[in-house]
Image: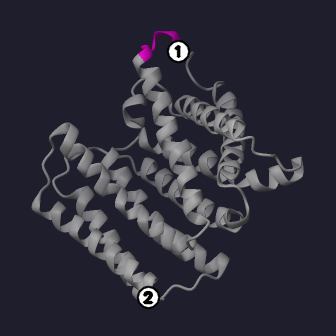
Amino acid sequence: MSKGALAFFPPLTLLVVQLLCSNLLLWSIALCQKISLPNPRQMLRLGLPGFIQPGLSFTLGLIGLSMTSASVEALIWSTETLFIIGLAWFLLGERVSAAIVSLASLAVVGVVLVNTAGAETADSSLLGNVLILAATFCAALYTVLVRRHAPKTNSLLLVALNQAIGLAGVFVIWLLSLRWQATLNLTQIPWQIWLLAALSGILLHGLPFWLHTIVLRSLPAGLAALFLTLIPLFTIGGAFLFLHEQLTLVQWIGAALILAAMTAISRLESSS
């Protein structure tokens, strides 16, 4: 959805629209639930990771996506799992067994096969790929930082504060970028594209971040990150159902590797 909207919106403008819609949803739910707010200093401390994700991460990611293909972008984002495992070990002291590392590597191999086998050849920018890789690292760092607050903070409040801080940071960057952009004529964008941008914001920022924070309340950051390797499977499944795209044999092998690795990791965690 974001890739389609980028045909009509500049990357930073699209991100502002997405985060506005995501914030509107999250804070509306928080208001309905009558969630009490902490003091301003505490709110700022809880929300600061939002500068990293969605702020810096999605700023770099959307600019990179506008310069490269979606398949290459998905492949680069698959490295987030390994970034998180490494950062969780380094910053949080979470123990990572050799078996988990091996299975995570196996899952990433599956992601590579799913995303590259049978894909159309497309031009990609080295700068765009580097920006996406930097965005992936920022996203991993965000997950590890939020893991510190997730067990003792309301999940919806934590995500809403991060999204609000992220929106503030992106909005400032967007205002500064207008000095170098051509004049935007947003009135010529069809309403269907505005709806697409709004929905992509809710489905990319609001709901998944809320659910992910709930998961982080009970799972280590490293283990929660391993489930991110399932994203390409959902992508391939959606393409098969809605776009009638067919999987190649190599892609089926990659999907099998991902599922096998996730099943093994689940059994290891349940027995520990």
- Amino acid tagged 1: Leu
Q: Is residue 7 magenta?
A: no
Q: Residues within 10 Å of mark 1 (few under 14, many from 20)?
A: few
User: Is residue 97 positioned above or below 184 on the image?
Assistant: below
Disc nearer the start of the sequence (1/2):
1
Q: Is residue 185 visible?
A: no
How would you classify the magenta stretch by its main secondary structure? helix
Q: Nearer the viewer, residue 162 or 74?
A: 162
Disc 1 secondary structure class: helix
Coloring applied to the structure: one colour
Residue 190, located in which quarter of the rendered image? top left
Q: Position of residue 269 (x, y in %)?
A: 45, 82
Magenta-highlighted residues? 186-191
Q: Which residue is mark 2?
A: 271
Q: Residue at x 44, y 15 (%)?
A: 191
Q: Is residue 190 magenta?
A: yes
Q: Which residue is mark 1?
A: 186
- Amino acid tagged 2: Ser
Q: Residues within 10 Å of mark 2 (few under 14, many from 20)?
A: few
Residue occupying the far top of the picture:
187
Q: Position of residue 18 (x, y in %)?
A: 54, 33
Q: Residue at x 42, y 65 (%)?
A: 227
User: Is residue 238 positioned above or below 112 on the image?
Assistant: above
Left or right: where 179 falls relative to 103 = right
Residue 70, located in which quarter of the rendered image? top left
